[in-house]
Image (cartoon, grey):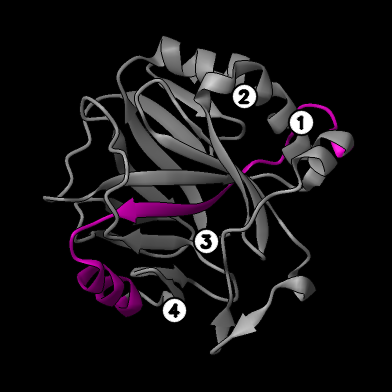
């Protein structure tokens, strides 16, 4: 597993627990002043994220094991429609997009079978197409387990600098779409993405503090995010 944990700064852990536990129906575990989602692919602390100018978190993506799990989260989230931002079929995956009380974008997704991922220019082709919501709801199972940190998508004013930095760390560029770049470590559609789009920004300093990876590393990226490993 390349991505292990994303550490997010939020304004209030009690509100975060309500969002992830009550609204999304995910397992939560509070450990002192930290809140872990599931087995901790996502860790929340009260604080302020300080990124470089014009850079902030677009969304962090949690991967569930299958469509039944995604359907379960979708069914729960639809009871609180005000937090739901949209749905998408990305060719390689199916996704639900929500936004928490601090304005942090959260994607919950399930990968499609790997042999169904379309190839393009040595990487994988992705798109944003309508999602078959009714089919997912029909397949919905119980509360999902096995959550993983799937990928992180950032907004930045200098996509090229971010791409160079992550390429030098061993992340390969897998796809480009509408001025955004997608990168992966090993054979995956993407672990990181960067775009220059005018997307909503988290409020009050909420955002990404740190990413913990399964490789030997301890650096700060051009956006001000600390990357630590093993």
Residue 167 covered by magenta stretch:
yes
Q: Is residue 96 left or right of residue 192?
A: right
Tell which circle, 3 or 4, labels the residue nearer the N-terminal end: 3
The residue lying furthest to the bottom in this view is 121
Residue at mark 1: 72
Residue drawn at point x = 43 percent, y = 52 percent? 152
Q: CA distance from mark 3 to mark 2?
A: 25 Å
Magenta segment boundaries in residue numbering: 139-168
**Which residue corresponds to mark 4?**
172
Q: Position of residue 108 (x, y in %)?
A: 60, 41
Dividing the image into 4 quarters, which one contains the N terminus?
Answer: bottom right
Alpha carbon of mark 1 to alpha carbon of mark 4: how far? 33 Å
Above or below, comparing residue 27 to residue 181 in the picture: above
Residue 20 seen in the current view:
no
Task: Please tell me the numbered disc located at residue 62.
Answer: none
Residue 98 in the image: state x and y as whole percent. Answer: 52, 33
On the rendered image, what quadrant is the C terminus found in? bottom left
Quadrant in the rendering for residue 227: bottom left
From the image, tell me which residue sits under label 2.
Answer: 24
Please name the residue shown 62% across and 58% down the image. 129
Residue occupied by mark 3: 2
């Amino acid at each position: 597993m390349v991505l292990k944990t994303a550490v997010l700064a939020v304004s209030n852990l009690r509100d975060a627990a309500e969002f992830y536990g009550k609204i999304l129906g995910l397992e939560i575990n509070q450990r002192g002043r930290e809140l872990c989602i599931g087995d901790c692919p996502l860790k929340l602390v009260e604080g302020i994220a300080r990124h470089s100018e014009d850079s902030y978190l677009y969304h962090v993506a949690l991967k569930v094991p299958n469509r039944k799990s995604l359907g379960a989260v979708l069914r729960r989230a639809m009871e609180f429609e005000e937090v739901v931002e949209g749905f998408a079929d990305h060719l390689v995956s199916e996704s639900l997009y929500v936004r928490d009380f601090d304005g942090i974008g959260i994607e919950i997704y399930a990968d499609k079978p790997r042999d169904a991922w379309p190839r393009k220019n040595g990487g994988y082709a992705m798109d944003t197409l309508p999602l078959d919501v009714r089919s997912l709801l029909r397949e919905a199972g119980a509360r999902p387990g096995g959550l993983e940190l799937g990928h992180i998508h950032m907004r930045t004013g200098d996509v090229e600098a971010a791409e160079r930095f992550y390429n030098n760390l061993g992340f390969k560029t897998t796809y480009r779409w509408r001025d955004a770049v997608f990168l992966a470590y090993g054979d995956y559609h993407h672990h990181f993405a960067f775009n220059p789009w005018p997307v909503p920004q988290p409020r009050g300093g909420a955002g990404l503090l740190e990413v913990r990876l399964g490789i030997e590393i301890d650096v700060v990226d051009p956006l001000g995010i600390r990357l630590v490993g093993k």
